[in-house]
Amino acid sequence: MPNLEINFCGVTSPNPFWLASAPPTNSGYQIMKAFDAGWGGAVWKTMGIPTVNVSSRYGGVNYKGSRMVGLNNIELISDRKLADNLREIEQVKKYYPKHTIIGSIMVQSREEWHSIVRDVQNAGADILELNFGCPHGMCERGMGSAVGQDPEILELLTSWVKEVSKVPVIVKLTPNISDITESARAAKRGGADAISLINTVQSIVGVDIDRFIPYPIVDGKSSNGGYCGPAVKPIALNMVKNCALDPDVQIPISGIGGIETWRDTVEFILLGSTSVQVATSAMHYGFGIVREMKAGLEDYMISHNFNSISEFVGKALPNVSNWEGLNLKYQVRATIDPEKCIGCQLCYAACEDGAHQAIKLSDDKNDRTPQIIDDNCVGCNLCSLVCPVESCIVMKRVDEGNAFENWKERMDKDNVPTTFNDDRAGGEGHHVPTVHEAWEKRKN
Ligand SMILES: Cc1cc2nc3c(=O)[nH]c(=O)nc-3n(C[C@H](O)[C@H](O)[C@H](O)COP(=O)(O)O)c2cc1C
Ligand code: SF4
Ligand code: SF4
């Protein structure tokens, strides 16, 4: 069996699956249940001066029958007394000495940071996580994303924590910033041992169009909140990749954002995460989801001959390039398997109106299988993405496979369009129906 144990900044965790700081980690009771279900670690709901929360506090995005593909919250940090949280950390750590407890904290002054760092590590937290990400409520009070959006302050506050911390310190970053690597570098300069990302994305998930109030509604009013769940995963993956590739960051990463399955977990690990954190999917389905995540991860590791997680942390990073490094000579074309086609003609509509008019319909009205016009197909993938039948439209390589030229090389050779009507334009040679043809077709 592969070994799921990880070493995160010198702290051993039974597996990379950690609960993110959120309602599932509000209390010792919940965290013990989660450990029993199989989670390797838990980031305690952010502790600080206790807050007062509003009701209601969540808004969801449902999409075509799928509930909560995105979740928006206007909840603040823990509304429980610090003493209660500290006592429970100590008790849980005694019962579960091998599991990882990460104490998430957020306060304001240097004295408060020093005090809470001492308290949480004395209670037995293995790691601290500094919440510089909360994009609602706390930022209005100069905390959360207000810190995460200002690299200088982020660095300063991290250095305050490092003045007294004896356990590793993770800085949790906000995605509500144009370049997250600036924050990651500031965290490193401040002495952070690791970073975690992403916290929630500032958002409004919808509006009650009859009462004219955005969701969630609190006595007739609303406020922007933090967005998370499966919808944010692509944003999170990209930001994790950016931080992992930055030569000035190079500290362990705990990946967060829309993780629900073992496959999501593997993707985060391949782009540089050592551990992953989960909030929304544990809120949606309960702690039991970790059983399938662990089993799936083990199967994946067996199928790839990986004995430990560290063997594939960042393994996809060498295959990430800037656009200018991609091979312009590589060409794929769509092919339709008529045996699998159900004749829905979605591919036709997509290519005709949304791509390159490279799919035609048969003149025979009884034959609903579309055909690809090879010369017009630019290999954009759209038809294969809209086709509802798995592997019915497959993209096949059609270049000879031995030529390589990227944009950078073309720039170096001065072989790129430089005027508005340059003959070297990429679209030259692709079929584009003339306006006159379109007009005639319309008349028919
Ligand atoms: C209701 C709710 C409360 C949250 N509270 C906190 C918090 O107190 N501290 C924190 O660092 N992150 C908090 N988060 C953010 C999560 O830890 C996590 O970064 C984010 O939800 C993305 O992960 P997910 O897509 O798995 O939910 C909260 C998220 C939700 C949904
Ligand atoms: S979308 Fe797929 S199934 Fe539908 S017509 Fe096109 S090839 Fe056939
Ligand atoms: S790959 Fe793009 S251009 Fe080619 S047939 Fe499909 S949608 Fe049309």
Image: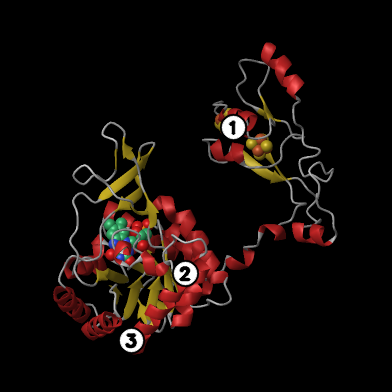
Residue 96 x %, y %: 23, 77
Q: Is residue 152 visible?
A: yes
Q: Quadrant of the N terminus?
A: bottom left
Figure disc tally:
3
SS label for mark 3: loop
Q: Nearer the viewer, residue 417 or 17?
A: 417
* Labelled disc at residue 350: 1
Q: Are marks 3 and 2 in contact (CB under 8 Å)?
A: no
Say whether marks 1 and 3 touch (CB < 8 Å): no
- Left or right placement of residue 293 versus residue 248 in this view: left
Describe the element under mark 1 as helix, strand or loop: helix
- Residue tagged 3: 165
Q: Report the Cα–Cα distance between label 1 and label 2.
A: 36 Å
**Residue 93: % across, % down:** 22, 79
Q: Which comes before the other along the chain, label 1 or label 2? A: 2
Mark 1 to mark 3: distance in Å?
56 Å
Q: In percent of the image, x 49 and y 78: which residue is there?
A: 251
Is 241 situated left or right of 41 in this image?
Answer: right
The answer to whether residue 305 of the structure is visible from this angle is no
Is 399 placed left or right of 158 in the picture?
A: right
Disc 2, SS: loop
The amino acid beneath tag 3 is Ser
Q: Residue drawn at (37%, 66%), measured in percent from left and top? A: 146
Look at the image and tell me in which quarter the C terminus lies: top right
How packed mark 2 is, by other alpha carbons closer than 10 Å (few <14, some 14-19, many 20 or more), is: many
Q: In the visual, does 277 lie left or right of 327?
A: left
- Picture coordinates of residue 438 (x, y %)? 71, 20
Which tag is nearer the camera, tag 3 or tag 2? Answer: 3
Which residue shows up at 36% across the image and 37% down it? 65
Q: Is residue 129 above or below residue 378?
A: below
Q: Amino acid at mark 1?
A: Ala
Q: Return the residue at label 2.
A: 273
